[in-house]
Image: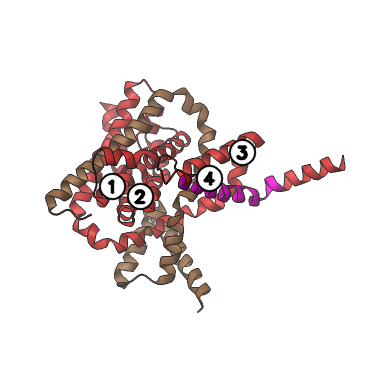
Chain colours: A brown, B red
Amino acid sequence: MGDGGRLIGALALLLLCQLAGEIAVRAAGLPLPGPVLGMVLLFGILLARGGEPPAALASVADGLLRNLGLLFVPAGVGVIVHLGVLAEAIVPLALAVSIGTLAAIAVTGRLMQALLGRAGGERR
Amino acid sequence: MREGEGLAALWVYLSADPLAALAATLLAWLAGLRVHAAARGNPIVNPVLVAVLLIVAVLLAAGVPYAEYFAGAQFVHFLLGPATVALALPLYRHWALVRGSAVAILVSLAAGSAFAVASAVALGVAFGAPLSVIASLAPKSVTTPVAMGVAEEIGGLPGLTAAIVILSGIVGASFGTLTLNLARVRDWRARGVAMGTAAHGIGTARALAVNETAGAFSGLAMGLNALATALALPLVWRLFASW
């Protein structure tokens, strides 16, 4: 199999993990998105396999993740559909989205760092 | 007359074919990256935000409805699924580090997840938002599909929730770095967990762009928060509503 074949194989593996995740989520009624379960599945495969991940899989995965932001653009543009509803409750929405989110980042980060410090050693 | 017909036919072709929306999305993203780089990587000039604003401006100027744009752009949107699966790779590469701090991750995730919900609900109540808006705000830090499902279950509006989730992610990605610096959170593991817990995939995209360890922890926190919120929020909400 050439390099092209390996790349397609890697893409197929990502899609198959997602597909298995979607099926399992629906069959078992799990409160998770299929792709998140697919991530767990692929992680399990890598762990069971051990060693370095296959180079083709690494290059497809890293290529997608390097442009992860791009993949949120179509959904992000969808905010314009809801501008009317957003404007109706603009003050609580703006405060919850901005202050709520940033406070959650600060609280979670501080707590995690404190717990890591107690567990011993600064590993940066 | 014939020229007008030609233009109309061209317009019909462009709006029915995914090509224009796809090309516009990729070009807007490249422009977002350029602007981000020109601002010397300042996180406030977030490439997702720049790209979204550019496309919104074009759609409004050309009078193209969102549904028509999305019919083409959905091919980019589709890749979110395999990209989420791909987060297994950074997680695998940093597994030793993750396993070594498992307790810290779980405790901070549970606390951060509860704090994200509680602060959103408290601000909503304090500023007199209607109950349906408060219910749409509650799951705002969780990845979109889970947030929409949870919001629907507790009486929120799924569409509004999607918009709130995206905006929260953009705020987190744009101002999270500054917030973590001000809070003097220097450990990459802690920075990643904070981003993934409060700002889901968009925060994870930012974390990955800065540091792979932070990205691995952020992707993990995003997945765990989806699970925690989906399981706990509807139950807690019912207690809160009956009380």
Q: Is residue B63 visible?
A: no
Q: Is residue A114 visible?
A: yes
Q: Are marks 2 and 4 in contact (CB under 8 Å)?
A: no
Q: Chain of mark 2?
A: B
Identity of the amino acid at label 1?
A: Arg
Residue A115 in the image: state x and y as whole percent.
Answer: 16, 47
In the image, the segment drawn in magenta is B14-37
Q: Quadrant of the N terminus of chain B?
A: top right
The Cα atoms of the two marked residues, 3 and 2, are separated by 29 Å
The Cα atoms of the two marked residues, 2 and 4, are separated by 20 Å
Up-down: is B143 above or below B237?
below
- Label placed on residue A74: 4
The Cα atoms of the two marked residues, 4 and 3, are separated by 13 Å
Question: Which is more N-terminal, label 3 or label 1?
Answer: 3
Identity of the amino acid at label 2?
A: Ala
Q: Which residue is mark 3?
A: B58
Query: What residue is at 53 percent from the left and 34 percent from the top?
Result: A80
Q: Which residue is mark 2?
A: B207
Q: Residues within 10 Å of mark 1 (few under 14, many from 20)?
A: many
Q: Chain of mark 4?
A: A
Q: Which residue is mark 1?
A: B191
The Cα atoms of the two marked residues, 1 and 2, are separated by 8 Å
Identity of the amino acid at label 3?
A: Val
